[in-house]
Amino acid sequence: MNKKLEHLLPKNLRELNVARAEPPSTRDDKKLPYDRMPPGQFELFCCELLQREFALEDSFIKIINIEPLAGTGHGQYGADIFVEKSNGNETWVAVYEVKRVKGFGKADYKNALKRFVDRLPQWKLNIKEFTVISSEFLPSALIAEWKGGESRTLAPNIDLYIWSSWDLNEKVKRHPPLVFKYFDPAWMERLFGEEGLAHFEKYGYYEFEESASWVNYSEPSQREYGEYIDAFSVQNEHIRIGAFLPSLTKDSATCSVELRNGRFNHVIVTLGHRQLVNTYFQGYETPLDSGERKFLQELFGQKGQWICDLGNCRIFISQPEAECLCDAFDAFHKAYERRLKDREETWKSRHFSLVSGMGSAVPLLEVKRGLWDLLRKFADAHDAFNTDTEWSIFDPTGAWLKIFTQKESAKYDAGYHVIIRPYRADNQWFQDFTRPDDEVLLAWIPPSDMSLRRYDGKIGLRYYWDALTTFNWLKDELIPRALYWQQVQQKKSARLLKRIIDPYRGYDAFRKAFDIKDYVFTGLYLSKTDDDILNISTAEQLLSLVRRMQSHFSCHQSGIFVSEHDYRNLFEALGAILKFDNGKEFRYLYGNLSYLKADDMSSLIEAVFHHAGTFNKWCTNSFKLDCVMRCFICVLETSASNMDSIHISGVAKLLLPLIVQMERMELLDRQIKRLGPEI
């Protein structure tokens, strides 16, 4: 028996020993003998039948209470079963009264109905249905007669139903285990054949109970473990997720998902890193009906029922289960996002463009193969093990650049300080052979990828360098120093006359004339000026931010969700900006806002503010948002001089929620690109 149902049973039913009802009395008898079941067992049977019926039909229905009609020793047990029902918008209660009464007649039904009506005020529930379950066979015409007339007058706002033994026979056909449990084995053979009986006699009957993870469950919880393992868990009414999070020492994320629903308690689904970032972290904090959850789809024609793709399993779950699943993934995503932000902040890697499939390596800059060869020669000439100069900081083994010091100094601790790995540049020009494949991409390698734990995870100039420090060191120190060293070596090997004619220049003079852009491509580092969103005060800062937002919306056809509140703020900000427009760009602005009615600039501004005040739904239309941001750009480019810092700051603050969402999606996009396509 289901544990929840067992907990709800009155003591007299809970302690009842089940004894099977008698076998068929004749060869052709196919009507189960409900009226001849031992006392109390008909009530217990009906409780289990209802629980199984609701589990099959609708997860919005559940038994919430069971009250006995009379105590132990009464000749007619009887029970009131209270069932909570919902259609997704409204919740109400249905009462089922179980009556094992010999010769159940019209007077018995009226007494049951009167008792029900008299107790309605006492129960204080939103009761809308009353069903009597009788162990007797009742013709449909008789049932219709009993439910009409006086009964309708007595309970005018209640839906009345009567289940007779015929209804029970039809329903129990879907539940062979109940027949095997409560009736003689001959009934199993009579209703389900010899094979049906043989199956249950061999294997017994098994009921799926809720997962053991919910033993002693009291309320939703989540926990992050970081001292020894980077783990995370979240559990709510229907879902439990146990996960591993990325860290400075490990770039991985996996999870297991358990469902409380007894139908799935024997299954634990595991999800990998790519699955999480590509599917289950998408649509963060969006409502189910927005359609932004890639793993959920509402079952056609059945509101409140959802098709869920969980790993390689496709299951059907209820609305509450779907909502709890989304809440659990959102909590996991929040912890995952926090870890990524911490890592990017520590590694100083946020503003570097990424190349698909490079994992946690951070691409810094591109150099010609000749320059890469020079850097390798420079490293060989300044071997940390065999030379003793200011630049003797290289481990020359292998094909990578490895910065290494043997002993502690005023500047460095002993050990490896950075690993720089060469990659083939992902340049489309090379695919059609219009240009030679002469580019090398230099990437910063995290210490975890090389199993370097000497500095206990410390990142800094004394320890292991972050990506930004490495980038600046390459372009400002190593590359100019290597090029100067090459010139010095060439002078040493030149003829005497050439050395006399060509005057010697020191490093300072060489460095003054040096321009890094002549030797490398540094465009992989994207410097930003709009990091401090709350302190934007100039039109140039706001324009830079809005351009970034416009690019974001134009590049994402899915995954965009703007709440009603944030959408209204967006149009409030647009209206505030339009007030400063000189009116010359009305046609362009109106073209981007053609769903609003306007004839001139003043009516357009009025329409924008009216739209901001009346819009009452969320928005997932990225093209619409793209067009709105184009309006911001147009005004800021043509009328920026008319705006003061107070209005600019106010507009930026109205846009803040959209900026937060954009940066969250950009973070996830970077991670998707890091992981690359699954091979």
Image (cartoon, grey):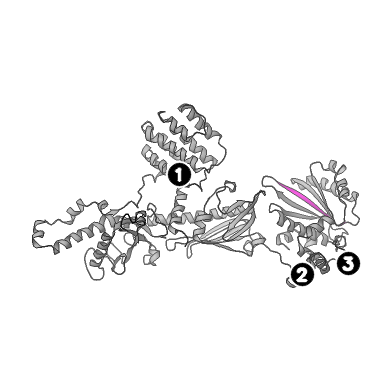
Residue at x 56% of width, y 51% of height: 293
Q: Which mark is residue 480?
A: none
Specify whether 519 is left or right of 80.
left
Q: Residues within 10 Å of mark 1 (few under 14, many from 20)?
A: some
Given the image, on which type of amino acid does mark 3 rest?
A: Arg
Up-down: is 340 above or below 287? below
Secondary element type, mark 1: helix
The N terminus - image quarter: bottom right
The verdict on residue 93 being magenta is yes
Rounded to the nearest angstrom, the CA distance separating label 1 from label 3 is 75 Å
Q: Is any atom of residue 244 visible in this view?
A: no
Rounded to the nearest angstrom, the CA distance separating label 2 from label 3 is 19 Å
Whole-percent x, y for residue 38 in the image = 85, 64
The residue that mark 1 highlights is 554
Whole-percent x, y for residue 225 in the image = 50, 61
Q: Residues within 10 Å of mark 3 (few under 14, many from 20)?
A: few
The residue that mark 3 highlights is 27
Stretch in magenta:
91-101
Given the image, on which type of amino acid does mark 1 rest?
A: Ser
**Splitting the image into 4 quarters, where does residue 171 fall?**
bottom right
Q: Residues within 10 Å of mark 2 (few under 14, many from 20)?
A: few
The verdict on residue 537 being magenta is no
The residue that mark 2 highlights is 195
Secondary element type, mark 2: helix
Given the image, on which type of amino acid does mark 2 rest?
A: Glu
